[in-house]
Amino acid sequence: MHLTVNGEIYDNLIENMTMQDLLDYLKLPANKIAIERNREIVSKSSFNTAILNDGDIIEIIHFIGGG
Amino acid sequence: MKNYIKSDDTLKLGSYEFNSRLIIGTGKYIDYKQNSDALDASGAEMVTVAVRRVNVSNPNKPMLVDFIDPKKTIYLPNTAGCFTGEDAVRTLRLAKEAGGWNLVKLEVLSDPKHLYPDMEETLRAADLLIKDGFEVMVYCSDDPVFAKKLETMGCVAIMPLGAPIGSGLGIQNKVNIRLIVEQSKVPVIVDAGVGTASDATIAMELGCDGVLMNTAIADAKNPIRMALAMKHAVIAGRESYLAGRMPMKKYADPSSPLAGLI
């Protein structure tokens, strides 16, 4: 399975990964980020159940300094 | 010493209430630690933040939330970098999912040279966000006509610029800021243009309800000290406004009585 995460391509990922599996793989803390899949927000409560599909476009955001 | 300052003089923004009338940014600091120290010195209870992609190749990079606790300080997510209403809605929906706040700062910019708000697109974006249930604090030009339109639409705070973002030029058009203050029933917050403490005081003396600043603190030689100066400047300006200044006179008026001289 392949995904695009924040504009970068990830190949050879295992099938049927959940959103939480992806965060674990990327070593990102779920409580500090928000995720969009194919332009739809994925709620934090569904990270453990949302199964990723081949070709999904994922955006993972957080807060940074700004004015 | 008896405290004569009214303690119920709070700033209400949407469904939130603040004791401090200073809102500070979190950009341009040397690091998040300095930013956090400046926040402590400023007494601000809310900070503006930007929404950006996580660096997936370096998950150990310091995160803002590790230095400024979102449980103690309200995060005001902005839409910097958005040029359309749709981009702004998308960004703030993600921000809401990341942090849970409903209060947002809308800014739709135009030309990078002056960073003036694109008011046509700002009005459109404000409408989309309000319909989406957000409480919108809106960065806008110092035009009383646009300010009124944004208020009528339901924005919870009108935030005219004092001068171009990051310029530090101070309040350029006091007449317009005053006109906006007089006509507005929602809080008016000068956003952008403050360079030094007296600029913040001038904004507050004009009757503004608060001041939002980033570069004036972050780019000061000593940001922590400037943050403290801004805290006092905003309080001084607010108290001065509430106190009501003396009338200006053309000639001198002695403070010591002339009668009874020896």
Image (cartoon, coloured by chain):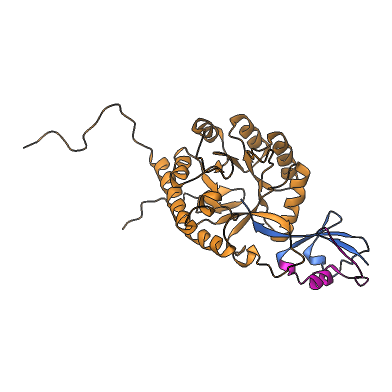
Chain colours: A blue, B orange
Q: Is residue B65 visible?
A: yes
Q: Residue A6: image x %, image y %?
A: 80, 59
Q: Nearer the viewer, residue B137 or B36?
A: B36
Q: Nearer the viewer, residue B33 or B150?
A: B33
Q: Quadrant of residue B186?
A: top right
Q: Nearer the viewer, residue A19 or B33?
A: B33
Q: Quadrant of residue B55?
A: bottom right
- Identify the residue at the far top of this view: B250
What segment carries the magenta color? Answer: A7-31
Left or right: B90 as drawn, with respect to B176:
right
Left or right: B4 as drawn, with respect to B122:
left
Name the residue: 63% across, 53% down. A66
User: In this figure, what is the number of numbered marks?
Assistant: 0
User: Any magenta on residue A29?
Assistant: yes
Quadrant including the C terminus of chain B: top left
Quadrant including the N terminus of chain B: bottom left
Name the residue: 42% across, 40% down. B241
User: Any magenta on residue B246?
Assistant: no
Left or right: B16 as drawn, with respect to B4:
right
Q: Quadrant of residue B109?
A: top right
